[in-house]
Structure formats: C-alpha cells, structure tokens
Amino acid sequence: MRKLDVARAGFTMGAFLLWAWALAWLAGSAVAQTNAGRLEALSLYSNVLRIPIDALATWLPDNAQLRLYTITDRPGLYVLHAPNLADQGAMFSRVVALMERRDMPRDRVVTMAEIAAHARRFGADPAGLTAGNNFSTAQIAHFFEVAREQGVVLTDGERALRTILVQWGLMRQVQQTWEAVSSRDFLITIPGIGPAPGGEVIDRPIRAAILSHELGHWQYFSDRAYAHACRAFWWQSLSYEEREELTRQLEEMGYDPSDRIVIDEMQAYLLHTPAAYMPIVDVPGPQGIDVERIRQRLKQRVALEQQ
C-alpha cells in the first residue's frame, strides 16, 4: 500500500484497507469506536441527491459530510461521499479484503486481527489509506451474506453501510439471504476533504483524481464494448513481458494478481488517473514498460473498438 504523497500520490484507488482504522479498532481505541458509532447514526438520516454526472463535482461537499448521490443519466451508478478516509475504511475494509486483496481468502470474512497482520506482512504503514472504492452492489451483498453465513459480528461501520444500502434501495434481505436489488447497480465511494492519517491531506485535486479513477471502473463495469477492448488489449496487444511487469507493479500495491483485477486496474490507472497521481512507473529495458506508450496504445484500441 502506497501512502499519499505530493509528488506521486500512489493511492490504490481500487480500495485498499485503512490500516490506521483497523489497528485502532484492535487496540480498542475509544476515538475509533466513537467515530464508528457516529457513522452508524449518520446512516439513519442520510438523504439521497439525484443529479446528472456533470453536476457531481459541483455538489460534492467541502466538509466532512456523508452524502449519497444517484446519478440520473448513468442508470445503475451510485456515489457515496464518506466524511473522511477513516469513515470510508470503517465501512469497507473487510469488503475489500474479501473481494480483491492479495493473499486474503475469497470464501470467508477475515477478522480485524487478520487485516492488521496482513498489513504488517506487506510492510504497510499504519497511516496508509484507502482512497476510493468500487464494487457492484452484488459484490457488497455477497460480503454481507458470507458474514451472515459465518455468524460474523459486523462492525459499526459495516452496519452503517448495510443500513445505507437498504435505505437506498440497493440491497435487501429475502428469506434471511442478503442480495442486490439489481445486478446492474454499481457503487463508488470517495473521501471527504481534510486531514488523513500520517499527516497527508485530501484536497480538491486529489479527491477529483480519485473520483475520475473510480468512474473509470464504472465505465469498465457498464460499457461492454469498452471492457472488451481493454481485455483484448491486455491479451492481444501487450507482450508477455509487459503483462508481467504491469501485474508485478499492481501486485506490489496489494492487488490480487488475477486477470479480473489487474485488467480493470490497468485501464483505470492508464486512462482515468491524472499523471500526477500515477503509481505505475516506467521500467527500462526489454523486460520493462513505457507507461505513456502503453497508454496511447490502449487509447487507440478502445477508439478502434468503439467505431
């Protein structure tokens, strides 16, 4: 997990874990528990704004607010603006672990102790953060169903997320089984502006970059022609060495190296992430990659497929 930094904010926008929150939870921090309880209370009174995609940036709050947005001209797209990074992590840390983290099980919800151990194993800084999340509501419902089957006690943040999704009409329980209302619904989350663990700050440009990246995941999820072009580019246009290097770099960020994850992250970074925040870097030599050259080739392949 890369920390946020000004020169190259290598935030893993595919939703890495908020280790600071996890470790505080394990330590029984009163502050963390109070914040999580506040988040659960906020979830009971969360209103939904219905706006077109072009109005989203204008309607994002300048302070620590929980805001929900239904995007009217992108059917199936929903945006959750978390008050801050800690609140975002409190809701999503174990969802991320189940769905896309390297060396984490896909068949059970891990404990917070396992999350902390995973962070230590990869040398993650406790001040590391998750910048944004992207999941289909079917994936999130799967998390809650696996937790129910295991008898896992949800954290306050997870209960808040469940309440939000039920009130939003995106998830429901049918005969005790959690399910998504529609397989086409997709949720992205971004953090509020303000201080982050480790002394970093989420400002407007960084939040805009996170939003752009996460919207790239929405395009991959919702646009079949676009997704097909990205997959075809990965298998047909990239060399074996280029695929290996891209996978290696994404794996080092903590992503699961499966094709399902790395192709989606490749396109979101190369086509939807501003250069100042790009964590994928050039590697010279025959076994390396030229990031700008790959970006331009991917753009050409997408344009060709969409003609």
Image (cartoon, rainbow, N blue to C red):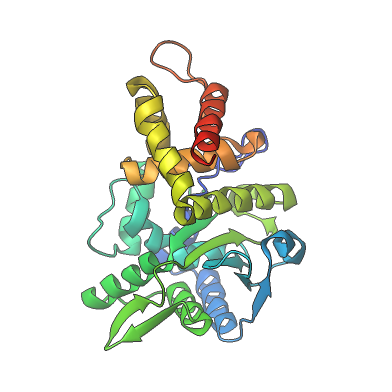
Q: Which residue is at the far top?
A: 285
Horizontal and vertical percent position of residue 266? 46, 38
Q: Quadrant of residue 45?
A: bottom right
Q: Who's the residue at 50% across and 74% down the image?
A: 33
Is 13 or 77 nearer to us in this picture?
A: 77
Q: Who's the residue at 30% across and 57% down the image?
A: 114
Location of the C terminus (image quadrant)? top right
Q: How many marks?
A: 0
Is 118 or 203 nearer to us in this picture?
A: 203
Horizontal and vertical percent position of residue 244? 34, 26
Q: Which residue is at the far bottom?
A: 175
Answer left or right for 144 relative to 40: left
Horizontal and vertical percent position of residue 135? 44, 60
Q: Who's the residue at 61% across and 39% down the image?
A: 9
Horizontal and vertical percent position of residue 49? 67, 76
Work out whether residue 301 can be spotted.
yes
* Above or below: residue 145 compared with residue 193: below
